[in-house]
Each structure stands twice: as structure tokens, then as C-alpha cells.
Image (cartoon, grey):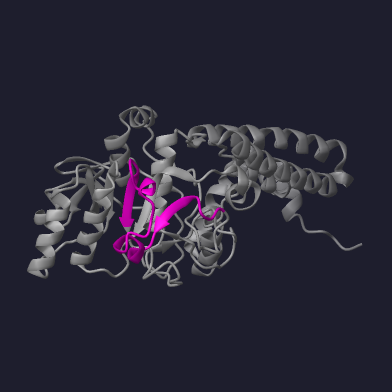
Amino acid sequence: MGTAFIFLLILFGGRLFNAFEVLNPVGEALADIEVTDIVFSRIRNELRVDPDKDVVLVNIGRLNREGIAQQIEILNKYQPKAIGIDAFFRTLKDPSGDSLLSEAFSKTDKLVMVSKLNNYNPFTDTFDTLETSHPIFSRHGHSAFANLITSADEQEQFKICRTFTPIEYTRSGSEHFFALKLAQLCDSSATSNFLRRSNQTEFINYRGNMALNDNSTYRGKFFALDWDQVLKEDFTPDLVKDKIVLMGYLGEDFWDKSWEDKFFSPVNVQYAGKTNPDMYGAVIHANILSMILNGDYIDAMSDRAGIIVGIVLCFLNVALFTWIYRKLPHWYDGLTKSIQLLEALLLLIIIVVVFHLFNYKLNLTLGIIAVLLAGDSLEVYFGVIKNLFSKEQRRLLFQVTKDI
């Protein structure tokens, strides 16, 4: 009964945060932080994270369609394994530029172009519409959605990306994730191994960022070419040959400090509090692609297992604290609070160590909350709730004390 009382408090306490607007910022701040971010940001040794040699990023900057077509023509000369375009070309503009870009796409053997899923329908678990580039461009390549999972509605809001969905469904059928489709075209074996996991949502095991980004812990883990380097052919052929080329917006140039199309990532040097976003969307796709190709996944404890572990932890603490309450009443407050703090700290350390060593994400949030609430909540349960169900105790509560 004591355990049930604590979980009722957790349930109604969570609703309290949502009900009172003044408490919403507190809840949002807690939601933005995950203990495992410490592993990416502080614990992993940068020297032990090797640069990815299969993926190359190319910045399209503010180039017009003729300029992007010229980039693709140059890249195709060096025989890339595949090219992914993380950009939309929804409407026709300049006839000459449109024609050149369409022709460049047609000469690319393995081309993947992004799509966007819109209007999710929770009743059918599908998206109503699929947004693509104009048919004159999209007909030359494979379509794959590039929606990244964040809690933000606008660019200016704090948006951190930790997960992605490999496959989503529209009215017309299934749609693969952008990085997954690229992996499928280049390494069917690695892709099959990934799909056999059958996870609806996957955690991103970040390798790192591209160079020249001071906000990330692991810089230079993906080779990148700025828009003018490609046009000048200022690179060695081996940088592109047999590599997967990801083209997208990486700033006006590599020295651009604006926030456009930038996200917060777990490899941000400041994993808690306000800081500048550190990773472009195209780089996040590169991290996901690298994870799939290398089979370097993150496994996670299910929500059901997390609830079971939380209940067991809570019950064990209730049993211990009940014994202290009855046998050592004068020591109750001091002992229970000391045990709670030590236990919560130990659980946090276990989460970090297991994630660091085994790439396994323990779901112990509910257990930690239950542990931290157990001491005081149990005191309320014994002192108020149980007494309310006792006729004798209710009589004593409302009995008028006579003056002597």
C-alpha cells in the first residue's frame, strides 16, 4: 500500500507540472536533460573515436541550382558510391538552372533525395501527405524522409535530436529514413542487420561533428568540403571515390556562426543549460548513416521493464524505510534522506557507466523518482493516510482537548 501511495503521488505530481503554467519551464528544462549526454559530452575519449571514412559532407551554401548542378557534375567525375541531397527543390525557377540540375541528377547512379512527412494521423499511425521536390528532379532518385525528432516547433527554440524513426507510413505506403535509404543502396548487409532490430525508434549513437565547430566535443569526425572547394576541385580524388556523399546546407560557408538548420546534439560541450546549437541537420544524418554502416547501435531498456524495475526499487525502499520507521523512529529522517541521496547517486552512476561501456541505455528514471520520494511520502502515508482509516485515530484527531 505504501508503494502504491508513492506511485499515486508520482502520477498526480506529473500532472501538477502540466496543470500549472508557472511549473512548465521546470518540466521542460528537466525534459531537455538526459544523464547519458554526459557520456557523449564529457566521458568518451575523443582520441578513441575514429573519423568516419565512408561518408563525406558537402556544403551547398547559398548556391543556386546551376551551382549545385556544377557541384554534382564535378563529384560524379570522382565516382562516389552514392549521393544524398538534403535539400528541397519544390518549384521550378530558372529554366536553365532547372534543366542543368535535372540533368546532373539523371547522371548520378545512386541518388537519394529528401522528402518530408506531414500531418500525422494518430488513429491510423500514418502521415497524410508526403512532400517531395518537383517531379522534374525527384524522378531521378529515391525518395526518403528526413524528419528529425525534436520537441521544437520553430528554429529559434531549443531543439535537441537524440532519436529517429527508421520507417514511417503514408497513405501510399512505407517511406524509409534518409540515412537508411542511403545505407540500403550502399551496403545491403549492414542495412539488413539494422532492420532486423525492428525498433520503431532508434537512439543515435553520435560519432561526432565536422571540423571548425567549437561547440562540439568530437570535432573533425566527418570529412567535409565547402561549396567553393568543390567548384575549384580543391580536394584529393580519394576523398570522394567510393564514398557516400551527403550534400546539404552547412552554413553560408564553414565560418558561418548562424543558427540556421542547426540542432543541439548530445556531443555539445555544454550538455545542460543554454548554449549555441552545434550540429547541422546534414551532419546528424551523417552520424545516423555511420551508425548503420558500422553496426554501432545503442540498445535501450523497454518502458515496461523500466516500470517493473521502478516498482521493485520502490517496494524495497518502502520495506527498508518501514523497518526504520518502526525500529528507529528518532533516526528516520536522517537515515532515509541519506539512503535516498546515496541510492539515487549510485543509480545515476550505474546509468552512465553501463551506457559508456555497453552502449545500453537503462531506463531507471521512474525508479530514481520513486527512491527520492519514498522517505517523505511514506511518512505521510503512515502519519495521515493509515490513521484516516482507523476509527480510534480519527477520534483522537477530532477530540477536543480539555483544559486542566
Residue 31 belongs to magenta span: no
**Residue at 36% across, 71% down:** 252
Residue 129: where, in percent of width, then height?
17, 52
Residue 51 drawn above or below residue 3 = below
Camera-side residue of 36 and 237: 237
Residue 185: where, in percent of width, then height?
27, 36
- In the rendered image, is residue 183 in sight? yes
Camera-side residue of 53 and 283: 53
Residue 258 drawn above or below residue 303 = below
Position of residue 348 in the picture relative to residue 86 (left or right): right
- In the rendered image, is residue 382 in sight? no
Q: Which residues are magenta?
A: 218-247
Quarter of the image with the C terminus is bottom right
Residue 84: where, in percent of width, then height?
28, 49
Quarter of the image with the N terminus is top right
* Quarter residue 150 falls in: bottom left
Position of residue 320 in the picture relative to residue 276 (left or right): right
**Residue at 88% across, 45% down:** 331
**Residue at 86% across, 36% down:** 327
Camera-side residue of 64 and 230: 230
Residue 367: where, in percent of width, then height?
62, 40
Residue 129 drawn above or below residue 270 = above
Q: How many marks?
A: 0
Residue 288 drawn above or below residue 233 = above
Position of residue 105 in the picture relative to residue 206 (left or right): left
**Residue at 53% across, 52% down:** 12
